[in-house]
Amino acid sequence: MKWQEMEYYAFIHLSTNTFTDQEWGFGEDDPKTFNPVNLDCRQWARVCKEAGMKGIILTAKHHSGFCLWPSKYTAYSVKNSSWRGGKGDIVRDLANACKEYGLKLGIYLSPWDRNSAVYGTPEYITYFRNQLKELLTNYGDIFEIWFDGANGGSGYYGGAKETRKIDATTYYDWKNTYKLIRQLQPKIVIWNDGGDRADLRWVGTEDGHVGETNWSLLNATGEVTRDMLRHGLENGDSWVPGEVNTSIRPGWFYHSYEDSRVKSLPDLLNTYYSSFGRNGTLLLNFPVDRRGLIHETDEKAALALAKAVKEAFAVNLAEKKKVSASNVRGNANVFSAGMAVDGNKNTYWATDDAITDASLTIDFGKPTTFNRFLAQEYIRLGQRVKAFKVEGLIDGSWKELANETTIGYKRILLFPTVTATQLRFTITGAKSCPLISNIGVYNAPPILMPPKIIRDQSGMVYITPADKESVIYYTLDGNQPTKETNRYEGPVRTDGKVNVKAIVYDPISKKSSAVAGERFDISRKDWKILGISDDKVNRVIDGDAATAWYQGRDKKLPADIDIDMGKIENVSGFKYLPGQGRTEGIITHYQFYVSENNKEWKIVNEGEFSNIKNNPLWQVKEFKPVKARYIRLRALHNTRHDDEAGYAELDLITR
């Protein structure tokens, strides 16, 4: 229960990988490359505390085998790094920082060690357990130990540079390893994605969500399918709740080229509602940068999430309201409907043993506006609810707002904003008499972020807010939008050059977002890409930065994209956006050609997209105006020095 009530805590990834731009180190990198000169564990703890997290799990040793503490069992650690002259101990620093900020400390220790010469032999198990003893006896209370499921493969292995395979179900002798862990840390919980069943389970993805149906149960033995990871097992015999792990960036370790790819507030809110809003906990990763700090962009994103969550759940509209139930266990006050809205997690509404379908009705006393519903079971006595629905009494009639499955420790539902005088929560199926410890009803304010503006190839302008219910105002002439300008009701048809500006407006608070703006040049509705048979190539000119096209792997650089604009234009520049979902195919060096007849071509611009690896955003190149109907972008080299070329968008600047 104490672990489940933490709800939200941080992952910290830092290693030699941080300095070599790798996700999985091979185990051979010189430890002296590790030198985070401004490392500050107090900064990590401060950010996590302010973000609303309750603990930090540190990758004390990732697959490369490099240790963030001066382990006496290996030379491959901070004691032989450049950082602090080999005298530092990051685990110690973080333990002290967690204590100062009131956070719990957890440890990630990779079972796989690509540096160890004895990995794959029985001798390694002694080594592995010795490191566990160091970590679990020298740094105070550890709330969680995390064992990654990646096991065996190619590695340095003391210089052997070979592939070693093991049976992850038997090699580590998990039964006795777990016994050792519990002797050293009796209150610890164990996360393990391989071998014997642990206390917690992976949810089958690192995308930041668990199944909407989510049972905190599995069987103690037997195969665990991907469906079981996502949804648990309704009739499982062991309590194994799900932990949702994801990174605030695409990667787990820091890469400067991901500075522009930190998850947005809408993305993080979606993760919030899809993790411990679905009976899970959330383990959100911060890839500490080469300075040894949580990057400013990551910090800003995490704090924005904390602010949005605080605002959304500031007032429980159900608390202490008049409430009634279709059945109360023994008609006893101790199990009455009011126990679900008294603000006390240790009291609960319960029904008689034979009653598994029951309802609870909250009377707000007046028309009340809301868009969030929260329910919690008293899981100390098990997870019971299989299905439920939520209804609102709107204009004198009951309207269904949601129809869902499991609840567990906590379930949060989002639905369009309604105004109702009463809310009815009905359990339509349960394994045994339900026990509901908490009901919450909230009216989350709209997310006032600048909306996203795109124009598709046909010239239609789409303006998308972070919150689907937001009111949007816009202009097409570059003037400042206000609530007196055009209200966005759907896609807007445009042709030629337009300067779109838009805001999100909340009529209740009378606040608006910052202004979003996009300048669009000539329409691309008549453009055609020549000489490429793959229909997906049209993603290059579809106006959507979230789509991309990559040339076939059988092609070699240089590679051309030729476009027929349909008529002569006065071209004075071009814009290139690399694919936003991958790091492959980012063009660094190019040539840009024009032609009036698709026969005679001339170069009007060439060079490099400077620093595009670190900032894979729009690249703009201008040149002396020239008349052309056909354009060609030739990709010469990319950031990975291979033959891939990728394109999210290609556009022009005209005079």
Image: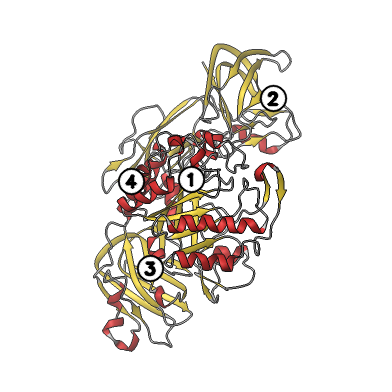
- Graded by Cα atoms within 10 Å as few (under 14), some (14 to 19) or many (20 or more), the crowding at tag 3 reads many
- Graded by Cα atoms within 10 Å as few (under 14), some (14 to 19) or many (20 or more), the crowding at tag 1 reads many
Residue beneath disc 1: 68
Q: CA distance from mark 1 to mark 4?
A: 20 Å
The residue closer to the viewer here, 486 or 140, is 140
The residue closer to the viewer here, 487 or 271, is 271
Q: What is the three-letter code of the residue carrying label 2? A: Asp
Residue 102 picture location, percent across and down? 31, 54
Q: Which SS class for mark 2?
A: strand
Q: Which SS class for mark 3?
A: strand
Identify the image quadrant of the N terminus.
bottom left
Above or below residue 505? Residue 635 is: above
Q: Are marks 1 and 3 in contact (CB under 8 Å)?
A: no
User: Which circle marks residue 560 in the picture?
Assistant: 2
Residue beneath disc 3: 375
Q: CA distance from mark 3 to mark 4?
A: 30 Å
- Graded by Cα atoms within 10 Å as few (under 14), some (14 to 19) or many (20 or more), the crowding at tag 2 reads many
Q: Which residue: 54% across, 60% down?
A: 203
Is 42 placed left or right of 154 in the picture? left
Q: What is the three-letter code of the residue carrying label 4? A: Arg
Q: Which SS class for mark 1?
A: loop
Q: Which SS class for mark 4?
A: helix
Single out the mark in the foreground, 1 or 4.
Answer: 1
Residue beneath disc 4: 46
Q: Are marks 2 and 1 in contact (CB under 8 Å)?
A: no
Upstream in sequence: badge 1 or badge 3: 1
Query: Across the whole image, how many numbered discs are drawn on residues?
Result: 4
Q: Which residue: 34% across, 48% down?
A: 97
Above or below residue 441? Residue 617 is: above
Residue 396 seen by the camera: yes
Residue 594 picture location, percent across and down? 65, 16
Upstream in sequence: badge 1 or badge 4: 4
